[in-house]
Image: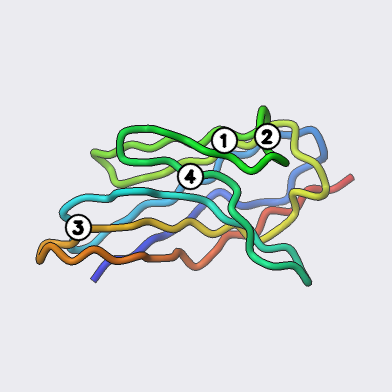
Amino acid sequence: QVQLVESGGVLVQSGGSLRLSCAASGSIFSSNTMGWYRQAPGKQRELVAGITSVGITNYADSVKGRFTISRDNAKNTVYLQMNSLKPEDTAVYYCNAVVTDLWARKSLYWGQGTQVTVSS
């Protein structure tokens, strides 16, 4: 059993900064690719940023230069530093992770989501 728990979502003013965290716990042997997605009301869930186990990153064009994804492999935790926030960044942010468990099974897990609201 593996769980992902996000934290850090709050109400913030436009231009502000916020850091989201997502910690994986449970029967983990290793965490592989980890990422952040977001879903705004009435819209599909979209990729925000991803990071491989060796630190290779990719970003959605809409957040390049403003958001930074990072991870702490020892803690099985992924972070999303969000700067210069805009009202259009308002969404529920979800983390996901490809995890290899103690029985060598590789599966994709999702967190429960954390609300980020950017006021104008």
- Residue 76 in percent (x, y) is at 30, 46
CB under 8 Å between discs 4 and 2: no
- Of labels 2 and 3, the one closer to you: 3
Q: Residue at x 75, y 44 (%)?
A: 12
| 103 relative position to 100: left or right | left
Please tell me which of labels 2 and 3 falls first in the chain.
2
Frontmost residue, 64 versus 114:
64
Amino acid carrying mark 3 in the image:
Ile
Three-letter code, disc 2: Ser
Residue that numbered label 4 is attached to: 50
Query: For the residues carrying marks 3 and 4, which lies nearer the camera in this image?
Result: 4
User: What's under tag 1, amino acid-wise?
Assistant: Gln
Q: Position of residue 107 (x, y in %)?
A: 29, 66
Residue 66, x across and y down, in percent? 67, 31
| Marks 1 and 3, how far apart at CA | 25 Å
Q: On the rendered image, what quadrant is the C terminus found in? A: top right
Alpha carbons under labels 2 and 3: distance apart: 31 Å
Viewer-closest of 69 and 13? 69
**If you read the primary sequence from the N terminus, does the residue marked by circle 3 or circle 4 appear first?**
3
User: Could you tell which of marks 4 and 2 lies nearer the N-terminus?
Assistant: 2
**Residue labelled with disc 1:** 81
Q: Amino acid at mark 4?
A: Gly
Horizontal placement of 55 versus 105: left or right? right
